[in-house]
Image (cartoon, rainbow, N blue to C red):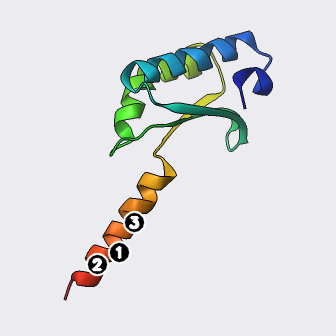
Amino acid sequence: MSAEQVSRDPKLETAIGELQDIVRRHYPAATFQVSQGEDPVGTYLRATVDVVDTDEVMDTVIDRLVTLQVDEHLPLYFLPLRPRARVLEELKSSARAGKRRP
């Protein structure tokens, strides 16, 4: 779902694009999903990035995100995610390693 389908607020749409641009500068292969959420109520931008630690992705946007939330009062939330295939592979590897322990 695109930002245009979720929100008609031009400020929010601009903020979403800005966060996407920041992430893409560091992670060009990142993909995004925009949706509405209820806890808390607002717009959620999910960024899927193939990294070991999603905190690295959050670090790229946190300063601007706080400014958007606090100073500009935008109900915008950011969730960095890892690709499902990477997570599943790591779970399988952990399970295999756990079976080898005495």
**SS assignment at label 1:** helix
**Which residue type does callout 1 highlight?**
Ala
Amino acid identity at mark 3: Leu
Q: Disc number at residue 91?
A: 3
Q: Is residue 54 above or below residue 10?
A: below
CA–CA distance between discs 2 and 3?
10 Å
Residue 19 versus residue 78 in the image, above or below: above
The residues bearing labels 2 and 1 have C-alpha atoms spaced at a distance of: 5 Å
Q: Residue lying farthest bottom?
A: 102
Q: Which mark is residue 98?
A: 2
Q: Is the C-beta separation of discs 2 and 1 under 8 Å?
A: yes
Alpha carbon distance from label 1 to label 3: 6 Å
The answer to whether marks 1 and 3 mark residues whose Cβ atoms lie closer than 8 Å is: yes
Q: Determine which of the numbered discs, if any, sits on residue 41 in the image.
A: none
* Residue 33, percent from left and from top: 63, 34
Residue at (40, 27) in percent of width and height: 27
**Which amino acid type corresponds to the residue marked 2 in the rendered image?**
Gly
Can residue 67 be spotted in the picture? no
The residue tagged with tag 2: helix, strand or loop? Answer: helix
Give percent across and percent down for residue 21. 50, 16
Q: How many neighbours does mark 3 have within 10 angstroms: few (below 14), some (14-19), or many (20 or more)?
A: few
In this orientation, does residue 94 appear? yes
What's the residue at 79%, 25% (across, down)? 5
Tell which of 71 and 48 is nearer to you: 48
Residue at screen point 36% across, 41% down: 51
Q: Residue 31 sits in which quadrant?
A: top right
Residue 37 in the image: x percent, y percent? 71, 40
Q: Which residue is mark 1?
A: 95
